[in-house]
Image (tube, rainbow, N blue to C red):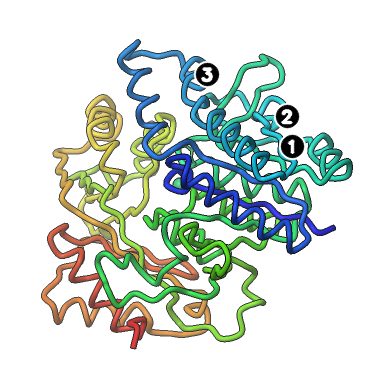
Amino acid sequence: MPRLVMKFGGTSVADIERIRNVALHVKRELDAGYHIAVVVSAMAGKTNELVAWCKQANPRFDPAEYDAVVSSGEQVTSGLLALTLQSMGIPARSWQGWQIPIKTTDAHAAARIDDIDAAAILRGFEENGSVAVVAGFQGIHEDSGRITTLGRGGSDTSAVAMAAALEAERCDIYTDVDGVYTTDPRIVPKARRLDRISYEEMLEMASLGAKVLQVRSVELAMIRKVPTYVRSSFDDPADPKLGTLICGEEEIMEHQTVTGIAYSKDESQITLRNVADRPGIAAAIFVPLAEANINVDMIIQVVSDASTTTDITFTVPESEYERTLAILEKNKDAIDFSEVQGETEVVKVSVIGVGMRSHAGVAARAFKALSEKHINIRAITTSEIKFSVLIDAPYAELAVRTLHSLYNLDQV
Ligand code: ASP
Ligand code: MG
């Protein structure tokens, strides 16, 4: 029998009534002839509450104990869904990460999955068609025997990893939106739901600010070639829609030049003035930041002229702004700059599409359209299938809307 992984997020399992609705979605797929593993998140808001409790108990909490606490939300929902399915006469078993086991690294609160032993779940399929209800977000570090978690939003990654391990036909991610949109529909009401998007484009969208899926889950789907749907859990279980398929580029017949527009508010810009212009300076700036695990994104260096100094501008997440300034101050002598300037009221708007590989002038059109709206561009980066501009925060929505219609993404 073909296998299917179905994942339900926090709002989809927020109370018993919704869990019953989830069970009806599961029943439909069982009746269609699948062996099924369901991956569940904690009830909406639960993980936040658990995180807050950890902080209250001990602001300098031990990450291993944090994982023991925050993984409990998924234990509850997996048991409740198994109970609900059983009440409908459907054989079902809950599975915690350690019971399967889902083996991970020991990076508590941000662990990566190393390996999943699917044998016990497969045995359940063979014996009585039992539905495996898997607690998302969690695993075990084998050597220490401790529970781990995969980082916020990690149930998406649990689901894709489970689909790969079970060699499932596909992975359906049920959530509170009915698919992936060309941009955030809250900003652009004319945003369109995409029928298909390639793994690469989705990876960019998720990394650049679209919050539908955890980035790591898209990475994994791409590497393991897991066809993944993003679809709504609020559809009538008897008459559901398929949502958006994330798949290989070759499975998408017609490509627009641009597929979507993403934006991120968690950005800040830092400029170092009069930096010495000699070999080793970029390393003096960026190696200490890398060692502190600070993700530097855009980097611009003013072209050197006859003088002996230059200016370097770069961006880091706004959440890392203060830490970055502190590290630069500490290394001031080695870097040899005169002044540091910063700005946190900036956003990054990104335009994504595999069609850019074969079309020239895509970014140039954006620069012109933005200038016509008097939007100043602070920094630009480009890569094969995307480009990003950094602009002042108050212009974010105008910029997204402008670019959305420029590339004909508006719904007609
Ligand atoms: N419950 C976890 C979180 O809120 C994992 C998930 O929902 O994906 O981050
Ligand atoms: Mg999520």
State how far apart marks 1 and 3 are (Cα). 20 Å
Q: In which quarter of the image is the C terminus?
A: bottom left
In the figure, 254 relative to 51: above or below?
Answer: below
Q: Which residue lies furthest to the top in this view?
A: 58
Residue 64 screen position, x and y as percent: 52, 17
* Residue count near mark 3 (Cα–Cα under 10 Å), binned few <14, some 14–19, many ≥20: some
* Residue count near mark 2 (Cα–Cα under 10 Å), binned few <14, some 14–19, many ≥20: many
Q: Do the residues labelled 2 and 3 touch (CB within 8 Å)?
A: no
Label whose residue precedes the other's in the sequence (2 or 3): 3
State how far apart marks 1 and 2 are (Cα). 6 Å
Q: Do the residues labelled 1 and 2 touch (CB within 8 Å)?
A: yes
Which residue is identified by label 1?
A: 116
Looking at the image, which is closer to me, 404 or 37? 37
Looking at the image, which is closer to me, 323 or 331? 323
Residue 403 screen position, x and y as percent: 28, 77
Count of labels shown? 3
Rendered residue at 31%/60% (across/down): 263
* Residue count near mark 1 (Cα–Cα under 10 Å), binned few <14, some 14–19, many ≥20: some
Q: In which quarter of the image is the N terminus?
A: bottom right
The kind of residue on which mark 2 rests is Pro
Q: Residue furthest right?
A: 127
Which residue is identified by label 3?
A: 68
The kind of residue on which mark 1 rests is Ile
Q: In which quarter of the image is residue 168?
A: bottom right
Helix or strand or loop: what does disc 2 sit on?
loop
Q: Is residue 131 left or right of residue 185?
A: right
Which residue is identified by label 2?
A: 101
